[in-house]
Image (tube, helix red, strand yellow):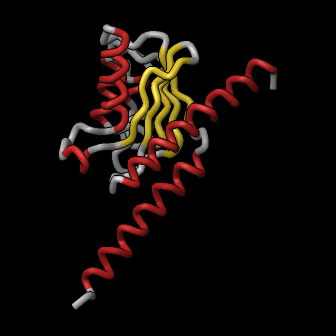
Amino acid sequence: MTNDALAAVVRDEYYMQLALAEARQAQALGEVPIGAVLVQHQRVLARCGNRREFWQDPTAHAEQIVLREAARRLGSWRLLDCTLYVTLEPCLMCMGAIVLARVPRLVFGARDPRVGAVGSVFNFAADPHLNHAVRVTEGVCGVECSEMLSGFFQQLRSRKKAAKFTP
């Protein structure tokens, strides 16, 4: 591996760790632990975790919040020269927003076999019908991202089961 390639791997892992920190904060609020960070020229423009439950907003996915905040900060909806780091493969809604915002690169940790739109169920990143293609790097800190999500849902199921049997 070249020095440049190694530096890129280290950089991707660094920003994914920031996204994981946002996921942990989201989990502390009772949210599904998904975090996102948008970076332009090694500068973090925006970072956040899911807020659907906290805000009671079905569009308050981490990716959506980060895209909105970065666009506001840049004064442009075109998020050129940016990389979006997210702990879970984006859904249809989020991939649609990523494509429409012209984000050139997406890095995600874990696949989402239920609703993933970057290859698991659909592939909006490279759909020839769309006016923009997104370069994708997957699996960065993937084990940690997967374990965080699995642990969250396991705890959720345990709480629901315990509540069901509590008199």
When asked about the image quadrant of residue 120, the answer is top left
When asked about the image quadrant of residue 128, the answer is top left
Q: Residue at x 30, y 18 (%)?
A: 100
Where is residue 78? Give x, y as percent.
35, 10
Q: Residue at x 43, y 10 (%)?
A: 80
Where is residue 164? Give x, y as percent.
25, 82
Q: Residue at x 50, y 38 (%)?
A: 19
Where is residue 65? Give x, y as percent.
31, 31
In this picture, is 100 found above or below 62? above
In this picture, is 70 found above or below 156? above
Placement of the C terminus among the 4 image quadrants: bottom left
In the picture as drawn, the residue positioned furthest to the right comes out as 2
Q: Could you say which is closer to the camera, residue 158 or residue 29?
A: 29
When asked about the image quadrant of residue 28, the answer is bottom left
Give the total number of marks visible in the rendering: 0
Drawn side of residue 24 relative to residue 100, left or right: right
Drawn side of residue 23 relative to residue 72, left or right: right
Q: Residue at x 21, y 44 (%)?
A: 55
Q: Could you say which is closer to the camera, residue 122 or residue 9?
A: 9
Where is residue 160? Give x, y as percent.
30, 74
In this picture, is 53 found above or below 161? above
Placement of the N terminus among the 4 image quadrants: top right
Q: Could you say which is closer to the camera, residue 70 or residue 132?
A: 70
